[in-house]
Image: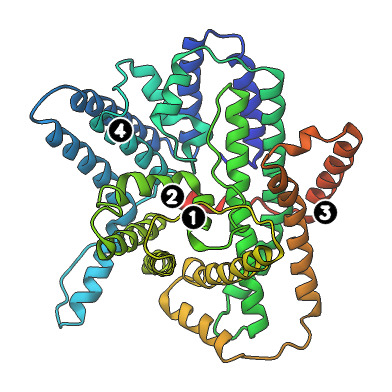
Amino acid sequence: MLYNSVEFVLFLPIVLLVYYFLSHRAQNLLLILASYFFYMWWDWRFGGLLLFTTLLNYISALAVSIKSPYKRVYLCINLTGNLAVLGFFKYYNFFVQSLATALSHIGLHPYLPVLHILLPIGISFYTFQMMGYIIDVYRGRIPATREFIPVAAFTCFFPLLMSGPIERAERMIPQFQKKRVVDNELFSSGLFLIFLGFFKKIAIADAVAQDVNSVFSHVATAPWPELIGALWFFTIQIYYDFSGYTDIARGVARLFGFNVVINFNHPFFISNIAEHWRRWHISLSNWFRDYIYISLGGNRKGAARTYYNILLTMVLAGLWHGANWTYVLWGTLHGIYLVVHRWFSGGGKIRAQQPVSTAMERIKFICGMLLTLHLIFLSWTFFRVQNLAETYEYIKGIVTLRGSIDGYLFYFVRLAFFLALVLLVEIPQYLRDDQTVMLKWPWALQGVAYGLMIILMILLAPDNELPFIYFKF
């Protein structure tokens, strides 16, 4: 069931109407039933997998919470079980095909069967979410929750089930355990986030999808202006597709009385790559930092080991995104960016971006932002293409200046139009550090803004529903 579908438009009000008349314990049961219905809408078999994940992690959390010499064994069993399920559904064919290719180079051609496996939507997100819960219990950061219903509701909560954000048990489970109060502020901000998310998705991300697809469908022959423009278009598409989804998810959660973490915080208003990753897909970045990078030793074992830990963490982050070597290389490239940035920063702890005040600081910030943006744009070639051969052709077309710039005035005017739309959304939020800043505007100004956004959604919407990009991860 897609957020941008008629079925969801009917599903949400019905669930909300029933929800508001129940006690908070009954609300949790309703959320579990609604979440399973929502998830099984694609395929009823997904429900069994979700139930297995819930039971595995509920029992494992209780096991690792007790004082026992086997706590580490219980943790390893849990992580092995979670990763085995994720690996089977998402990576089995990838590793089998990669192994077959490697063996063929040395003259071996064994029969390695490829399975036709349906990838369960959201499995990467809820698997990592529950692994984080188990690790936190093992580390003693939080106690294991003995009540099954709050854990089950946390595992399958439908606003977060498909593509996150990857929430933490210490934030969410207490919200399931207590009575939720949906006041006017929470309700109105929830509706606003849903509206904003649909605007991002329909009027911007989906509207530029055809510009992206038309170029990436013929990368071997596309002229260099199209290749460069497509990287800008794809940046707009993936950012507003995913942040639009996140806004809708957070908004829907607020309607039910839940506060969910921000997943994007203006990730392109930055002067370096480290700051970008503090603001882009924040819940995943923090997950890899806390459970992979720090577990590897973080920056506690010298500069060389720190660089290795950064690189390995980003390689795994790339692999998390998809079973393709292009994603691995995308993660590797960002790992190299982060290592080089840390090296140039002296190898010490990298501080958060500081406000700029002087003219020289502004110039330095803008130069850093432009350099970082184009490094990020370059990395998208690995993320969006189908294989390494296409990546080579894409970069080759830009480096060799294939084709001519003549006749692309309208193309870049169209790009400038969508960049302007993005800035009109981002700048007010960035200046006030408030995603719901529009709710504080005068009513007349809000009315004009909402009216224009609705008109743009009507005019720019594609003919068909497009799924959210991160559903395939």
**Reading the chain from its start, which is encountered first: label 1 or label 2?**
1
Q: Which residue is drawn at 34% across and 53% down?
A: 90
- Alpha carbon separation for disc pair 4 and 3: 48 Å
Q: Is residue 235 above or below residue 173?
A: below
Q: What crowding class fits label 4: few (fewer than 14 Cα within 10 Å), some (14-19), or many (20 or more)? A: many
- Mark 1 in CB contact with mark 2 (< 8 angstroms): yes
Residue assigned mark 3: 459
Drawn side of residue 276 relative to residue 66, left or right: right
The numbered mark, 1 or 4, whose residue comes first in the sequence reads 4
**Left or right of 170 in this view: 428:** right
Residue at the disc numbered 2 = 285
Q: Write down the residue under mark 1.
A: 277
Give how far apart the Cα atoms at labels 2 and 4 are. 17 Å
- Mark 4 in CB contact with mark 3 (< 8 angstroms): no
Horizontal and vertical percent for residue 260?
53, 32
Counting from the top left corner in percent of width and height, residue 386 is at 46, 70
- Secondary element under disc 1, as helix, strand or loop, is helix
For the point 72% across and 38% down, the residue is: 195
Q: Mark 3 or mark 4, which is nearer the start of the sequence?
A: 4
Mark toward the viewer: 1 or 3: 1
Cα distance in 3D space between marks 1 and 2? 7 Å
**Rounded to the nearest whole Å, what is the CA distance between mark 3 and mark 2?**
35 Å
- Identify residue for label 4: 136
User: Which residue is pictured at 47% across the width and 37% down the height?
Assistant: 161
The quarter of the image holding the N terminus is top right
- The one nearer the camera, 410 or 181, is 181
Spot occupied by residue 146 in the image (x, y as percentages of width and height): 29, 16
Secondary structure of the residue carrying numbered label 3:
helix
Residue in the image at 62% along x and 51% along y? 266
